[in-house]
């Protein structure tokens, strides 16, 4: 089983908001890559966590 980042974002779609989870490795933010990334169907979803 592959372990991924735990960041989740609600993404608006035509049928309502869908939660998407980042598909990158768990420590990508600590390694200097602040952009989370996932897909809803064929559409890429990217976001950053504001702290």
Image (cartoon, helix red, strand yellow):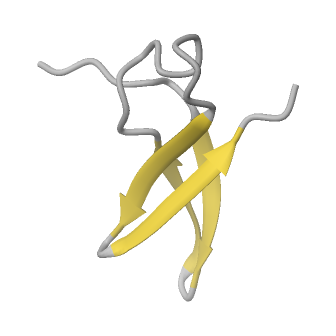
Q: Residue furthest bottom?
A: 14
Residue at (43%, 66%) from the top-left corner? 44
In percent of width and height, residue 25 lies at 35, 22
Image quarter in which the C terminus is found: top right
In percent of width and height, residue 22 lies at 45, 39
Residue 31 vs 34, above or below: the answer is above
Q: Nearer the viewer, residue 30 or 8?
A: 30
Relative side of 51 to 1, left or right: right
Residue at (55%, 29%) from the top-left corner? 33
Residue at (47%, 47%) from the top-left corner? 37
Q: Residue furthest front?
A: 32
Residue 9 vs 1, above or below: the answer is below
Residue 9 vs 2, above or below: the answer is below
Q: Residue furthest right?
A: 51
Relative side of 7 to 51, left or right: left
Residue 17 vs 33, above or below: the answer is below
Residue 30 occupies quadrant = top right
In percent of width and height, residue 12 lies at 64, 73
Relative side of 26 to 15, left or right: left
Q: Nearer the viewer, residue 29 or 9?
A: 29
């Amino acid at each position: 089983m592959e372990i991924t980042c735990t960041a989740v974002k609600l993404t608006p779609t035509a049928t309502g908001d869908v939660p998407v989870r980042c598909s990158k490795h768990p420590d990508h933010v600590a390694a200097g890559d602040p952009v989370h990334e996932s897909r809803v169907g064929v559409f890429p979803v990217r976001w950053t966590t504001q702290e």
